Image (tube, rainbow, N blue to C red):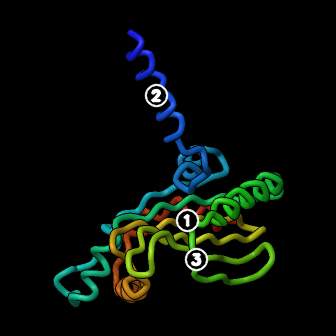
Amino acid sequence: MKSNVVTLIFLGLLALTSCNSEPSLQKYFVENSEKKNFIALDISPGILNIDQTKLSTEQAEALNSFDKMNILAFKANDKNQTEFEAERVKIKGILKSPKYQELMKVGSGKDGATISFVGTDEDIEEFVIFANRKENGFAVIRVLGKNMNPNNIMILMSVLQNSKINMEQLKPLEKLLEK
């Protein structure tokens, strides 16, 4: 009986210490995807409509390293500027975690974008693009994959130029661009 109680206490402590209460982008996406000022999209590689038989080995490898893209956008307006600023600060706080390595920063002040990644230079698990503009809102884009690297991303960008993107999947983002 005594050993059962000790085992239960040990398992309870283990469960409590293994739970990570640290904020993460994944948690942020889940918590906000259904809220009224947010637009959430999950995009698969299928959106690109690419004939893989016409790709070089390098292009096919780059495309195969890409699993999916999650987009969460906040539509700002005159009435929700306080919420916009609070949410923007939350995301910036998450991206300051040592887990995210900043690759590039564009713009200044409250308008601009950053590109960060999770992983190592040769084995990137996730690229994160965070772009914000006070008049429109912000968007956080998570590009998830396996064995991605900066070269794969550049190759993927060139493949995107020749793709026939299914614009129907991107329709919800039009709301963000409307004034």
- Name the residue: 59% across, 51% down: 28
Estimate the x, y position of residue 9 in percent, counting from the top left: 48, 23
- Above or below residue 161? Residue 143 is above
Spot occupied by residue 136 in the image (x, y as percentages of width and height): 71, 67
Q: In the structure shown, which secondary structural element does the residue marked by tag 3 occupy?
A: strand
What secondary structure is marked by label 2? helix
Query: Viewer-proximal residue, 19 or 44?
Result: 19
Which numbered tag is attached to residue 43?
none
Q: Is residue 2 left or right of residue 79?
A: left
| CA separation in Å, label 1 and label 3 | 13 Å
Residues under numbered marks 2 and 1 in contact, where contact means CB atoms less than 8 Å apart: no
How far apart marks 2 and 1 lie (CA) works out to 29 Å
Q: Give the residue type at disc 3.
A: Ile
The quarter of the displayed image where residue 52 is located:
bottom left
- Residue positioned most to the left: 53
Between marks 2 and 1 in the image, the one whose residue lies nearer the viewer:
2
Please name the residue shown 42% across and 12% down the image. 2
Badge 1 or badge 3: first in the primary sequence: 1
Task: Kindly identify which residue carries mark 3.
Answer: 115
| Tag nearer the camera, 2 or 3 | 2
Verify CB contact (< 8 Å) between mark 2 and mark 3. Answer: no
Q: Which residue is mark 2?
A: 10
What residue sits 47% from the left and 35% below the top?
Answer: 14
Left/right of residue 60 with respect to residue 25 in the rendered view: left
Q: CA distance from mark 2 to mark 3?
A: 42 Å
Quickly name the residue at label 1.
Answer: 99
Q: Earlier in the sequence, mark 2 or mark 3?
A: 2
From the top left corner, tell me how far across and down residue 29 is, in percent.
Answer: 55, 52
